[in-house]
Image (cartoon, grey):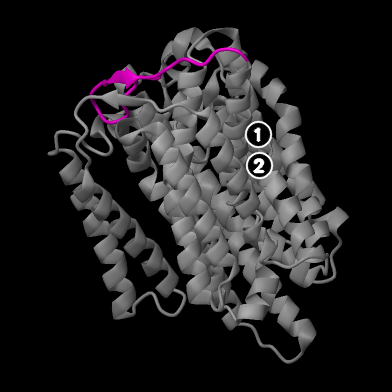
Amino acid sequence: MPVSPPSTSAPSAQVVPPSAEPHGSAPVEQYAPVETGPRRWWILVILALTQLLVVLDGTIVNIALPQAQVELGLTDTQRQWVVTAYALAFGALLLLGGRVADYWGRKRTYLLGMVGFGVASLLAGLARNGTELVAMRGLQGVFAALLAPAALALLTVSFPHGRQRNTAFAVFGSVAGVGAAVGLVLGGALTEFADWRWCLWVNVPVVVVALVAGQLLIRESKAEGDNRYDVLGTVVVVLGLGSLVYGFTLAEHSWAAPETVACLAAGVVLLALFVWIESRVAQPLLPLRVLTDRVRAGAFLLQAIFGALMIGALLYLALHLQIVMGLSPLQAGLGTLPMTIMTLVLAPVVTQLLARFGPRPLMIGGPLVAAVALVYLSRITVEGSYAVEVLPALLVLGAGMALVLVPLQNVALSGVEPHDAGAASATVNASMQIGGSIGLSVFTTLYVGAVAGAVVTDEASQLSAFVDGYSAAFVATAVTLVVGAVLAAVLIRGPRERLLPQGGQVGVHLG
C-alpha cells in the first residue's frame, strides 16, 4: 500500500508551535516543561512507536480481510466497513481530539487514547461476527483520534526548537512514512503464520509498553484559554459523513431506493448544517476561513481524492493478489512494496523539481500519472502474472504519488495564520481518511454491481467476476484522479511565494 501523508492522523508538527490553537484563538501554555537530556529521546521513541501504531492499523487488516471474511461470514459490504469504520471515525473526530488534548491535558489524553485503543483492538480480535468487528474498528478510530494529536503535541512540547527538534520530527515522520507498508507486510506475516486476529491483537503488547513508558517518562502539559468544545458541530459532522458513506453503501442495491436517497440527502443536509454551525459558534471545530481559501481548498480536495486511492481502491488490489492470483498473505503484503519504494526513492528528486518549478505542475501531473497506472491496472485478468499486469502499474503509481504527496502539505498550509495552522494541517489529514471512507463505499458499490452482473457457472467464472469488479473500482479511481488534476489546475494558482510558504522552504512529508 502507498505511503500516506505525514501523519494520517494529526496536525503537522513542523508548522504548529506548542501554543498554536487549531480552532481560532491562540491559547497560552499553562505548564509545558521542556525536557532535556536523554529523557526526551526516550519520549521520542515512545511517541514514534505510537505514530507507527496508528498508521499501521489503517492497513494491517487489509491483507487479513479474505480470511476474516471466510471465518466470520462477512458480506462484501461488511468487509468494506472493516476498513471504513476506522478511517471514518478517525477522520471525523481528529480536530476534536486535538482540542481535547490541548485543554484537558496532553498526557492525560494520550494515556486515555492508548488504553481505549488497546481495549478496542483486543475486542476486535475477539469478534464473533461482522457487526462486532466493524463496531470495534470504529472504536479504534475514535481513540486513535485522541491518541494521535496528543502524541504529536507532546513531541512538539518536548522538542520546542533547534536542531534536535528537526531530528525528532524527521524520525517521527519517517516512522509514519513506513507505517502503511509495514502494516501490509506485518499483516501478511501474522495472517499466514498465526491467525488474522493477531493483526488486531498485536496492538495490545505495544499499548502496554507505551502506557508504562508514557506514565513514567511523559510530563503533563496543557493550554489555557477558552476551552469550550464544539460538541454540536462534532455530532453533526459525524452524522453527516456517516449518512453519506452509508448512503453510498446502500446504493449497491439501488441508487433509486428510498433508503438510499434518504441517507444521501440526510448526509448533504447535515454537512450543510455543519457549515452553518461553524459560521455561528465562538470556538468552531473547523474555522471556515481555513476552507474558503482557493489554494487550500484545492489541496484538501486533492488529499481526499488520494485518500480514496490509498484507502479505497488499493484494498481491491490486495484482494486480487490473494483471491485471484493465489498469493499467500505475506506474498501479497510484499507485493505492494514496490509502490512505496518508488515513492521514497523519487521523493528527493521531486523535492528538487518542486523548488525549481513550484507545486502546480507537479500537483496536476501527479494525478494524471497515477490515473495512467490505474487504467493499466484495470486490465488485469484471471490468468495474468504479477510481473506483467501488476508490478508496472505499482511503479508508475508510486511515481504519481511522489509528485503529489511531496508538495501537498506545504500547499495546504500556504497563507495560514499561526492560530489556524493546527486546523489546516489536521484538515489535510482528516481529508485523506474521509476521502478514503467515501471512496471505498463508492468503489464497493461499483464492485458489487459488476460482480452481480456476471454469469457465474464455475470457479473460473467466479474469479472472472471478481476481476470485473476490481477493474470497475480501478477505472473509477482513474476517473477520480483525472478530476483531481482538473481541480488542481483550476484551484492551485498564484505566485510561488503564495504556494510555497516560508520563503519557498520545502517540507517533504511522506509519513
Quadrant of residue 438 within the rendered picture: bottom left
Q: Position of residue 41 (x, y in %)?
A: 62, 21
| Residue 124 rendering spot, x and y as whole percentages | 55, 66
Q: Quadrant of residue 179?
A: top right
Q: Quadrant of residue 507?
A: top right
Q: Please, what is the three-letter code of the amino acid marked with disc 2? A: Gly
Residue found 34% across the figure and 21% down from its top: 20
Which disc is residue 418 wearing? none
Q: Measuring 74% from the left and 83% from the top, which residue is drawn there? A: 461
Whether residue 391 is visible: yes
Tell me residue 338's x, y (percent). 79, 43
- Horizontal side of 71 relative to 268 (left or right) equals right
Whether residue 351 appears in magenta in the rendering, the answer is no
The foreground one among 417 and 482 is 417
- From the viewer's perspective, tell me whether residue 201 is left or right of residue 409: right
The residue to which callout 2 is attached is: 179
Asked if 366 appears above or below 199 in the picture, the reply is: above
Q: Which residues are magenta?
A: 18-37
Pointer 1: what residue? 175
Magenta highlight on residue 20:
yes
Q: Residue at x 73, y 28 (%)?
A: 346
476, 187: nearer the viewer: 187
Helix, strand or loop status at disc 1: helix
Q: Is residue 300 visible?
A: no
Mark 1 neighbour density, 10 Å: few (under 14) some (14–19) many (20 or more): many
Q: Verify CB contact (< 8 Å) between mark 1 and mark 2.
A: yes
Q: Identify the amino acid type marked 1.
A: Val
Above/below status of 257 relative to 114: below
